[in-house]
Image: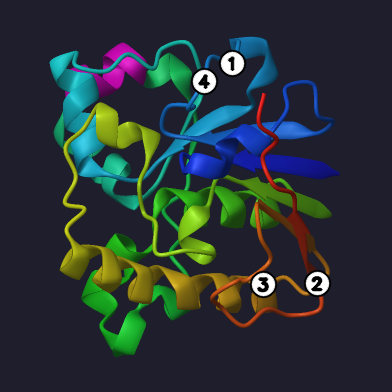
Amino acid sequence: MRVNVLGNGDHAYMFERGTPGRLLICNMPPFAIPRNEVYATCMVDFKMMKALQEGRIQLDMYDWILGTRPKVWMEQSGTFYMKYSHLIKGFYPHVPEYAAINGDKRMAATNFNCGHMAVHYACNKMRAEEVHIYGFDSIFDMNLGSFTDLLLESDRSTPNTVRLANNWRPIWTNMFKEFPNVEFHLYHSHNNIKIPITKNVKIHAKKKLDK
């Protein structure tokens, strides 16, 4: 089975609607996609839950898969949980041990971002044979910009960008190793990837054509 995972980076445009396979999105998609084309949206952050609870963001057009911190949020906010329980396809609180960068287990869930969770869910729960990954620019460039930054304020200062990239990138290498029988396909405008990759990872580099 093929699963497509759509991130929020600048290269998300490389995903084309109608591409075969089930589609997981990270938080909100960077462009409009109808509900019937989306398997679920994946969320891992307290700030996304807070924005949903306050009504600053609407995501009731999709089913939800919620990670560790959203699960805690739901447990502490019964009314909010009851309001949206019909959308929750499942909780996925699993965080692999290798997310504890430098052995700091307290930070594992923080390091394990939405994209990590979506891809891991595709491999572990959906039993994907192929995972096609779009809009994950931080693997290729020092670019952590995200469509959700337009909706929720994020610290994109240089020191924080470097810190997050250093935390996020090793997780990908370990995840590719964890699932050696899964083919991972990464899409970007160049193939100068910034992490070690295994033989089950393929890069599809295609420059954006000017219209």
Which residue is found at the position 50% from the left and 17% from the top?
Answer: 62
Q: CA gap, disc 4 to disc 1?
A: 6 Å
Sooner in the amino-acid sequence: mark 3 or mark 4:
4
The one of 181 and 5 positioned closer to us in this rendering: 5
Residue 86 higher or lower than 71, as above or below:
above
Q: Is residue 209 left or right of residue 63?
A: right
Sooner in the amino-acid sequence: mark 1 or mark 3:
1
Asked if marks 3 and 2 touch (Cβ < 8 Å), the reply is: yes
Asked if marks 4 and 1 touch (Cβ < 8 Å), the reply is: yes
Q: CA gap, disc 2 to disc 4?
A: 29 Å
Mark 4 neighbour density, 10 Å: few (under 14) some (14–19) many (20 or more): few
Q: Amino acid at mark 1?
A: Ile
88 in magenta: no
**Disc on res. 200:** 2
The nearer-to-camera label among 2 and 4 is 4
Q: Is residue 7 visible?
A: no
Query: Where residue 92 sits: x, y (%)?
Result: 47, 48
Q: Amino acid at mark 3?
A: Phe
Mark 1 neighbour density, 10 Å: few (under 14) some (14–19) many (20 or more): some
Secondary element at image label 2: loop
The nearer-to-camera label among 3 and 4 is 4
Asked if marks 1 and 3 touch (Cβ < 8 Å), the reply is: no
Q: Is residue 74 left or right of residue 179?
A: left
Secondary element at image label 4: loop
Q: Is residue 163 visible?
A: yes
Sooner in the amino-acid sequence: mark 2 or mark 4:
4
Asked if marks 2 and 1 touch (Cβ < 8 Å), the reply is: no
Magenta range is: 78-84
Q: Is residue 76 left or right of residue 112?
A: left
Q: Amino acid at mark 2?
A: Asn
Q: How many marks?
A: 4
Which residue is found at the position 27% from the left and 48% from the top?
Answer: 69
